[in-house]
């Protein structure tokens, strides 16, 4: 209960004050319209404040749950023996690190706020935490990581010969570095350039040279962070599923020709592993498309002046997009074979350890002269001698 109240107190927006609510309501008959307008303003301000508070608390909860869930998945991937058996396992491990960093930085951004301090310190906190620049960088890098995984799966399954002949270890390292470059270019640098501190408050993404530049950047961001990844996911997995369907027909034909059972079992296990990875990444990509559709669409529509921009809706859609970082580890834990196997092993060890403790507690103590049966046998032998 104390932790919950603390989170609510921290999550309360700094600009929510009594000054935003008009308490000067007259009951004079000549000012009925003024009273009605003030009442509507009061209700709107109250709803806006409650929505902002609920959104901030939800963001903090998502940050905490996302940190715990991603940490569990990361631990399972690092401790598993097969975590480095293939390139895709390395990429998924890196993807989990990105989601963990995004959740941790989201929580820090909600907690750390510039207060009474020097301008340089306040600017540092604004750039790294309060503006969510680093959290946005990790989140955008996660989108880039999903595209890297999709491209790696596409080349390996659709063009297997080229993958075997031309894939090199440095490409795996490049696939880890490129998402961070993508995140810095689309998140960190634009936020730093357009954010500043004014009156002790962090003004995020408000310092633009002119509205045209802001509109152009919003359109490019919509393409780079939503339409582009969505096209890569749809195109890549459509081709992959077509190849998998064709391979299944070939396997069925080989079965009818009487191929050896050992060869068939090996091919079946390999295909099952590939399908498990594809199914997992498809679910993660679909979750990304659903969680980000509102915030990306609303941002581009407000930039084009199609719909009015409401801060409350923006915050609500942002919380919906944050949930993507929290849902990914649950997908890995329920669908990805390595994480599921590690979870089963840990549960079996826990059950066995508990069973061993119960058995040790139920076993009767051994007497100094031996067990009870040994003492009974000795007494019988002595009786016979007598």
Image (cartoon, rainbow, N blue to C red):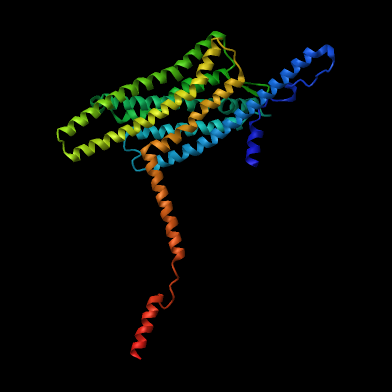
Position of 39 relative to 74 (above/below): above
At which x and y percent is residue 216?
Answer: 50, 11
Answer left or right for 123 relative to 341.
right
Q: Quadrant of residue 115?
A: top right
Residue farthest bottom in this picture: 386
At which x and y percent is residue 211?
Answer: 56, 9
Q: 361 or 74: nearer the eye?
A: 361
Position of 175 relative to 80 (above/below): above
Q: Is residue 88 among the parts visible in the rendering?
A: yes
Image quarter in which the N terminus is found: top right
At which x and y percent is residue 18?
Answer: 74, 25
Q: 89 or 122: nearer the eye?
A: 89
Residue farthest left in this picture: 257
Position of 344 relative to 53 (above/below): below
Question: Residue at (44%, 22%) from the top-left corner?
Answer: 182
Question: Residue at (36%, 35%) from the top-left corner?
Answer: 89
Answer left or right for 356 relative to 301.
left
Q: Is residue 200 among the parts visible in the rendering?
A: no
Q: Quadrant of residue 123?
A: top right
């Amino acid at each position: 209960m104390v932790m919950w109240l603390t989170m609510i107190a921290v999550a309360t927006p700094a600009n929510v004050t009594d000054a935003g609510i008009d308490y000067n309501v007259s009951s004079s008959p000549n000012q009925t319209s003024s009273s009605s307008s003030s009442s509507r303003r009061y209700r709107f301000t109250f709803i806006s404040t409650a929505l902002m508070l609920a959104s901030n608390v939800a963001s903090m909860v998502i940050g905490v749950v996302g940190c715990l869930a991603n940490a569990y998945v990361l631990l399972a991937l690092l401790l598993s023996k097969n975590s480095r058996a293939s390139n895709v396992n390395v990429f998924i491990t890196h993807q989990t690190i990105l989601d963990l960093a995004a959740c941790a930085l989201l929580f820090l951004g909600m907690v750390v706020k510039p207060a009474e301090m020097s301008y340089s310190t306040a600017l540092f906190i604004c750039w790294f935490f309060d503006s969510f620049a680093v959290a946005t960088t990790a989140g955008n890098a996660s989108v880039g990581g999903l595209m890297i995984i999709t491209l790696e799966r596409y080349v390996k399954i659709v063009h297997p010969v080229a993958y075997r002949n031309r894939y090199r270890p440095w490409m795996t390292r490049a696939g880890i570095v490129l998402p961070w470059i993508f995140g810095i270019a689309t998140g960190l640098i634009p936020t730093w350039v357009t954010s500043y501190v004014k009156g002790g408050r962090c003004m995020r993404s408000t310092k633009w040279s002119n509205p045209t530049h802001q509109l152009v950047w919003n359109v490019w961001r919509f393409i780079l962070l939503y339409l582009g990844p969505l096209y890569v996911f749809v195109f890549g997995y459509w081709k992959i599923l077509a190849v998998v369907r064709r391979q299944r027909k070939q396997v069925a034909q080989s079965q009818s020709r009487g191929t050896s059972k050992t060869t068939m079992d090996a091919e079946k296990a390999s295909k099952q592993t590939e399908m498990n990875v594809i199914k997992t990444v498809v679910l993660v990509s679909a979750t990304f498309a659903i969680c980000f559709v509102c915030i990306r669409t609303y941002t581009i529509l407000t930039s084009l002046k199609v719909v009015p921009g409401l801060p409350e809706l923006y915050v609500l859609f942002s919380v919906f997009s944050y949930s993507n970082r929290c849902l990914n580890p649950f997908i890995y834990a329920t669908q990805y074979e390595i994480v599921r196997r590690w979870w089963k092993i840990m549960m079996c060890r826990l059950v066995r350890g508990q069973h061993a403790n119960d058995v040790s507690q139920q076993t009767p103590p051994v007497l100094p002269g031996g067990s009870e049966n040994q003492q009974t046998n000795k007494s019988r032998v002595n009786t016979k001698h007598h």
